[in-house]
Amino acid sequence: MQGNEHSRERQGRWETEGLEGATLEIVNGDRDAGSWLQKLAVAEKLLVQSAPRLRPRLDAVAAAYVYLQWVGNGTLACAESGGHHRPNRHAELARSMFRSLEWVLAEGGKDGEAQALALLARRLQAYLPSFDAAYTASTPLTRIRDIAHRNDIPHELKQEIKHTIQNKLHRNAGPEDLVATEAMLRRITRHPGEYPDAFVGEFRRFHAELSDFFSAGSLTDSLAALRPSLGDDPSDIQIVERFLEAKRKLEAAGSSADMNDVVDTLHTLGTLRALLCSRLSSGLRNDVGDGVLAGRQRWRQAEIQAEDYAFVLLSRFSNLLESQGGAESLVQGKDGGWALPLGSLVLGLRQVGLGAGPGLARECAALEQELATWQRLGGFGERDNALRLKASLQRLRRLTHDFSQILMDSLSERAQKLGDALGVSGDISSVFTEAEIRASVVFQLSKLAATLLKGTELVAGGSPFDVVVGGEASGKLQEVDALQPGCAGVEACVLVVRSATGDEEVGALGPNLRGIILRHDIPHLSHLGVRARQEQVPFVLVEDDAFFEESIAPLLGKHVTLSSVSDATTLTSGAADAPGLTGKASRGRPEAGAPSWKGEAPRRISKLSASAAVVPLAEVEAGSCGSKAAACSRLLRLAVDSKGNSGSEFAAPPGVVLPFGTMELALEAGGQASAFRDLLGQLDDMLREPEDDPRNARLARLCEEVQGLILNSSKLPDEVIKALQDSLPADSPVIARSSANVEDLAGLSGAGLYDSIPGIDPSSATSLQRGIALVWASLFSRRAVLSRGAGGIPSQAAAMAVLLQPQLCPDLSFVLHTAHPVTRDAGVMWAEVAPGQGEILATGSRGAAWRMEIGKAGDTLRMLSFANFSTAWLVARGTGKGGVATLAPTTVDYSSQALSGSEEARAQLSRRLLGVGAALEAEMGGAQDVEGCIAAGQLYIVQTRPQP
């Protein structure tokens, strides 16, 4: 705004069609809210009066954040209201909103909202006026009245100040008053000596007061205002003074300041902000006094300004680093070149963690510790150390993506809808969230991390493509959000996939899927990787956003050829009729009338008794209990034979099996056997129909009906439950694992297709029954039915046994392929290792494992990547429905993980994996896909199957 002239006329629109929730409330309120005071009242009603227990939810906070920012920067103009309201009324509204926002920050929000609330409820406060006692007084900001009546300035100037600033401020205050005051200050200081120094000095003091009222002062000003509340603690005073001295030194150096100067200031700023946050860490009582609340606002304002200054410092550091050569300068400078950039990353992470919710804060703390440790250890010119640093930097990049996604999910749609409804230009509303992200400390961290990642890649080498499944595929390059039925369209395609869980089906996606490019890292030996390999679908990972935008994005919508091998991958424009998958013309649902599966019929028990239904693992046969249970039985025997063999010794957990037919008899006991058979017939009939959206919807409903029948109507007799309890340890949780007749077979692994249920309490009949029923029900998940249908296997032919074993509590879990999964080299093993439960590897959580190539000749180890999963999954007993536990994530600090910190630890593990893998391969007569773990130093093998 260029002036301070306001009328009561308003322009704009208030369209409410299609709006709901907080956005609707704001638009309806703004219709009658012309002045800044009235607009603050709209926000106060939303954040306080309409909020449950005066604690606003995310919808209200996010919408108010957009609204008040637009009001504050003039995007939504204020107008005269016709009333006469001094600024103390504005301050009172601010106090009400501040109190509710601080309650939210202290108490957090509902699951899924806590992170966004922590970010937005803090930053929203920057758009509230101060409610210090000076501004809640009945006649605040009176200095301007005295200035307007001075006798040492021209009459015309006095009148101008009175009418454009004094009267307007005391009648209808708004952000435009600060604009007018700043314009007047520039005018009266343009020619030194033109006006009396006393007048200019008094006007400067008024400008400082007004800036303070509008929360527009500087960090230095805020710290000066906090000085009385620091008390006499010399350490706190010293923290503030050290920062101010570093800031003065940096500003005095100007363009001659170097990276050391910036990092020194950033370090003192981190200590300062930690002090500010510590003063805000205590909760806010419901009966807190106004004076205490006003003091807290000053601390909060300074804390937010400190975060903003961190953005400035990190931006300055990044610019200095790039001016000195960027990534190339890091490599040339050896360890010394990495020290300051890594130090600035550590300090930047500290800043993000101080303003984040609990989840992001824990992630920041772990990354801070990792990077500080790698900085201390150095050696970045060595390949393995560069890979280790790369893993942490990729984890940091993932954090910045998560942060950005939180803002996009919270703000983008609300800003667009609010802007459309209030007549805000689309050029403003459409980029609102992008502007927020680019103005954040996280944005500067992402820029700096990108430079360091380039440095690690210069040392470690490698391609921006990471090959999971090699081969060549041609088709139209299309981008999709996820792998799901129908995403492959109606013509041959190579899919760019934004996100995957690692548990998706490939065969059920149809014959048009020719190749996959996934835009984030997952374990290569995840279920998705195994299924793509089994279906011969070339599959690569690309994490580098800059490479994607430069080399892949321009090809979207065009016909391409993806050629991927372990050491070279290309994506080039290609003909539409390129051959696609060598020797594989089609996949997916068999044509109507195609022959059904000809596998061996399962041997089902005919009597639901303890002797028939509870089979000790050592006595299991594949025909009645499935290949997985039979393999585990064999592992028990092999484990005994391996004892004393230091090179290949391993253990295997014992257990019992409920054989094929137990589920059907349990349904018969519940009176639902006939209904179950009818539903399976309907499933098989439906799979013969042409695939389309209506059929898929009906299929999903039918699968849910089958699963509901199993979960609600199957019942094991008390004698069977007791036999299970007598066979299982009473003092530790149990895992129920699938062992179907349609998994763990050569050419039909069914990896991850059926559920394992951890954390079952064996002393609880309810927990046992529920866990077993969940495994049975997984046989008829929509995903499983579609996958079997793609292979011509009718649901009526599928059978499920359940293997129950003591649940291990591993320190490490691994998946081992005894032949290289990409090159098929029988002389090289491939292992992926992760901390904690193996679920993180199987389902393909975002992140990388410790990935190893182990040469069988000469016992050679080559690290391909270091682990950077954010969490290790540990069992939290009894937290799920019916006593079934969930897996609880624990944030991992890899600086405390031996496999990241010790070359000898990696070598020892690779030797153990080599010995056990070679023994299993020889015993089983071919390459194996092995799953196992390390628990209390003991190596366990929990599963082995033919390698696809």
Image: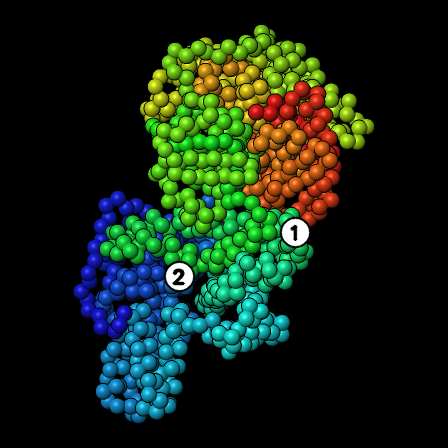
Left or right: where does residue 441 sit relative to residue 891?
Answer: left
Figure label count: 2
- State the SS at label 2: helix
Image: 838 above or below 48: above
The residue to which callout 1 is attached is 382
**Mark 1 vs mark 2: in front:** 1
Label 2 Cα crowd, 10 Å radius (few <14 / some 14-19 / many 20+): some
Toward the right, the furthest residue is 644
Mark 1 or 2, nearer chain start: 2
Q: Quadrant of residue 189?
A: bottom left
- Picture residue at 63% right of the left edge, 59% below the top: 334
Q: Quadrant of residue 842?
A: top right
Camera-side residue of 659 and 40: 659
Camera-side residue of 325 and 636: 325
Label 1 is placed on what type of residue?
A: Glu
**Labelled disc at residue 96:** 2
- Picture residue at 58% right of the left edge, 35% below the top: 841
